[in-house]
Amino acid sequence: MKGLVYILSVCLFTALACSTSLKEQKNGSSFSSEKSMVMPADSTKVVKSDAEWKKMLSPEVYTITRKAGTERAFSGKYWDNHDKGIYSCVCCDLPLFSSATKFESGTGWPSFYQPIEKTAIMVNTDESYGMVRDEVVCRRCDAHLGHVFNDGPKPTGLRYCLNSASLKFKKK
Ligand SMILES: [Zn+2]
């Protein structure tokens, strides 16, 4: 009988311990919130008409993200941002780049050597202005983000040169 009581209390203790730790995870420990920020949880395409984007975005953001514009170097809000956090798409909130892969490119545009997930972005050939460049767009909503070049630092050797106006920064 004594043994049974012992086993029962061990079971009860284990169950309590499990439920507590589950509760902790649910209550938004940094681990779970970080995971949801980093994973492009919903990659369903966001499709809006030109008129809808125009209504939703400021004129500057609309021109850059929907009409492949470029902000003036050293004019944006993130080229000199050194805070830790996540840069998401200004149009659809998809997490795109992390401060962990941001580097000083000296160009006056926020520069990264890799996206959070390969699947967060798409690269298209851009032949405008008499140049052949690789345009970087948001995978979810096709927002123009900037261009990618082959003169970046290790480990990728890539330089994702982006417009601050295409991004929304959330401090970690
Ligand atoms: Zn987007």
Image: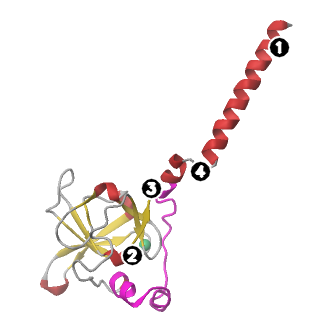
| Residue 124 vertical placement versus 35 (above, below) | below
Does residue 144 appear anywhere in the picture?
no
Identity of the amino acid at label 2?
Asp
Task: Evaluate if marks 1 and 4 touch, with contact meaning CB atoms under 8 Å apart.
Answer: no
**Residue 164: percent from left, percent from top:** 33, 75
Report how far apart the C-alphas of labels 3 and 2 lie in the structure. Answer: 19 Å
Q: Quadrant of the C terminus?
A: bottom left
Residue 90 versus residue 81: which sits nearer the camera?
81
- Which is nearer the N-term, disc 3 or disc 1? 1
Farthest residue toward the right?
1
Identity of the amino acid at label 4?
Gly
Regarding mark 4 in the picture, which secondary structure is present there? Answer: loop
User: For mark 3, what is the residue?
Assistant: 38
Report how far apart the C-alphas of labels 4 and 2 lie in the structure. Answer: 31 Å
User: For mark 2, what is the residue?
Assistant: 142
Regarding mark 3 in the picture, which secondary structure is present there? Answer: helix
Q: Which mark is residue 5?
A: 1
Respond yes or no on whether mark 1 lies under 8 Å from ligand 1: no
